[in-house]
Amino acid sequence: MAGVVMKDIRKAYGQVKVLHGIDLDIKQGEFVVFVGPSGCGKSTLLRMISGLESITGGEMYIDGQLVNEVPPSRRGIAMVFQSYALYPHMTVYDNMAFGMRIARESRDEIDRRVRSAAEILQLTPYLDRLPKALSGGQRQRVAIGRAICRDPKVFLFDEPLSNLDAALRVATRIEIAKLKEQMPDTTMIYVTHDQVEAMTLADRIVVLSAGRIEQVGAPLELYERPQNLFVARFIGSPAMNIIPATVTGTGEATMVSMKGGKSVRVPVATGTSEKGKAASFGVRPEDLSVATGEDYLFEGRISIVEALGEVTLLYIEGLADREPIIAKIPGILDVTKGETIRFSADPRKLHLFDAEGKTFRI
Amino acid sequence: MISQIVSAVGVVIAGVFACALYYWLSDKLLQIVFPVPKENVRAASINLNRRAVVRPWLFMGPALILLGVYLVYPVVATFILSFYDRGGVNFVGLANYRWAIFDGQFRQSIFNNILWLAVVPAACTFFGLVIAVLTDRIWWGNIAKSLVFMPMAISFVGASVIWKFVYEYRGGNETQIGLLNAIVQSFGGDPQVWISMPFWNNFFLMVILIWIQTGFAMVILSAALRGIPEETIEAAVIDGANGWQIFWKIMVPQIWGTIAVVWTTITILVLKVFDIVLTMTNGQWSTMVLANLMFDWMFRGGGDSGRSAVIALVIMAAVTPIMIWNIRQANKEMGGH
């Protein structure tokens, strides 16, 4: 079981606490993505798994073995860095062979592994080149190749695509997905701030914020059932519209009245004690549709129209003193700025959070 | 005092103003010589091109003339002088060169210079590199670096005077005030006359230059070390390399160009070493070096411009190729990869 288990992992730099007790159980062969805004501690957590960063408190197990004090090279991990971190004075071949040479592997074994990694990543023609003679995408492939050569139990990726341009990012992302398919037993942990990477690559996503885990789950689970406001806003683009509201009726379904007037029935059960309390009502831009009749969720004035062809983004003002509501309507829409427009939404796609920002949905 | 400051400031301002005036006037002259007529586009473009060709030469002119007078002319004159006798009057052919080849002191100087070359650049670079690496890891590293760098601020003569006290020897029953002898004595040894100890005294003199130049090597190499991407070192840690392997296989190769520049810069300096030897021994007790020998033959007792010209040319011949390589290497480093 080459999984990674974390029990109450903490990190502090002097008085500054960065991670406040992370509990996580990553199974062998899983592709787990850590995602969160910058400064949330996701890279620190990855570096603690690698051993580059010391562990202040808690226990870290890799493959069932406590690794808190084990040096990086003995943890059975390999890491791919954002900046590639290739040795600039070594050829592609030597870059990949370096670790094995340090470990005094036989010449034949080194050659076999380097060539097989180069084959997988289509790097064979470049083995004699120096990193500076390679493009960004090729360099990142070499870095991945170097990791493959270590034959690790756990693969760590630290924002590996951030230095690539948009087109290469998509291509390399697909390559990483393919690589995972070829190595079904290898655990992969991937750090990114890009939710598209997280959604497309992950078996499970770990959303981190301010040194804490906000939610762990499959990509669509996070999208459909965010457990709190942070995850609701973080997953999905544009972010979910959040409207402050008050609970006016409880029971099988909850009645809330939005600031700005209208009451909405949300099919989420709440207890009677919630009545009269503040809540946040959420709806994703893409779940809104233009309403023609009297049965609508809210109405407002269009302040900005962004026509992208495949979708049209509408920024709606009108709900008192708050940021505009964004609606993402498929296709091209014949509306103009300043028009008043009404929206409705499928009640099953409405979200409701309590005053602390936790979901009411169980 | 005040009047001196005023006149100094005045000269600086006047100098800058004169330079600006020169550029302005010479450009005006250019505009008069190559006019750009509005109605004749063809002539205008030809003259504009001519201006662009002439302008750099015009602007660099004063500097080129000064360099010619103070650098090129002396080289040529020295070359010519080397074929003349001591007064520079009678042509003697290769006699001065023949003298140099068979002269014991000249050979001694060549030997000592080679000794200096072998030891000083290597020692400075090595110590500089080691100190740069070690001081990067400790909180008082910057204090240590300042201390190591401080001798750079002392003139060679000043440094030599300091070290004279280190090597000082007092005869008879006088108390030894030299640091080295005091240490030797405290361990029960006999005080030595360090700077007249044949062969080894060369090394005692080299220590002074190493003491001065290690700071230079350290500063440059420290900057280069900081330029090494941290991730490459972390990648090596994950690859299982230990501190020694990381230093030699990952860090040193990445700053190899800078190490070479530091090494050759100190090499050039060593080839010209003069002040330390002059101050400490004046070339006695077989510590003579070429620059000092040249000085002796020209100005002290020798009065022989022919022979000292030969020695000067030998030094120049040794320095020039290293200098060219050094400049090229430095340009390459600055140009990036």
Image (cartoon, helix red, strand yellow):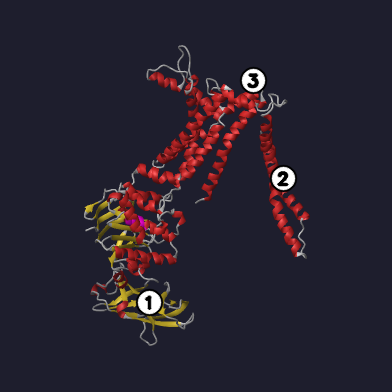
Q: Which of these two is toward me, A100 or A205?
A: A100
Q: Are marks 3 and 2 on the same chain?
A: yes
Q: Mark 3 points at which residue?
A: B301
Separation of residues labelled 3 and 2 (CA atoms): 44 Å
Tag 3: Cα neighbours inside 10 Å, few (<14), some, or many (≥20)? few
Which of the two marks, 3 or 2, is nearer to us in this view?
Answer: 3
Disc number for residue A286: 1
B225 is within the stretch colored magenta: no
Q: Is residue A7 visible?
A: yes
Callout 3: chain: B
Residue type pointed to by label 3:
Gly
Q: What residue type is labelled 2?
A: Ala
Identify the main secondary structure in magenta: helix
The answer to whether tags 3 and 1 share a subunit is: no
Q: Which of marks 3 and 1 is in front?
A: 3
Q: Distance between the residues labelled 1 and 2?
A: 71 Å
Look at the image and give the residue range highlighted in magenta: A144-149
Q: Where is residue A9 in the image (x, y as percent from the top left)?
A: 27, 55
- Cα gap from disc 3 to disc 1, whole angstroms: 98 Å
Mark 1 vs mark 2: tell me if same chain: no
- The answer to whether residue B42 is left or right of residue B152 is right
Label annotation for residue B18: 2
Q: Which mark is residue A348?
A: none
Q: Is label 1 in a helix, a strand or a loop?
A: helix
Q: Nearer the viewer, residue B320 or A223?
A: B320
If the image is split into quadrants, where does the N terminus of chain B sit?
Answer: top right
Rendered location of residue A105, percent (x, y): 30, 48
Mark 2 crowdedness (10 Å alpha carbons): few <14, some 14-19, many ≥20: few
Q: Position of residue A275 (x, y in %)?
A: 27, 74
Q: Residue B272 at what x, y percent from top left? A: 57, 32
Residue placed furthest toward the bottom: A293
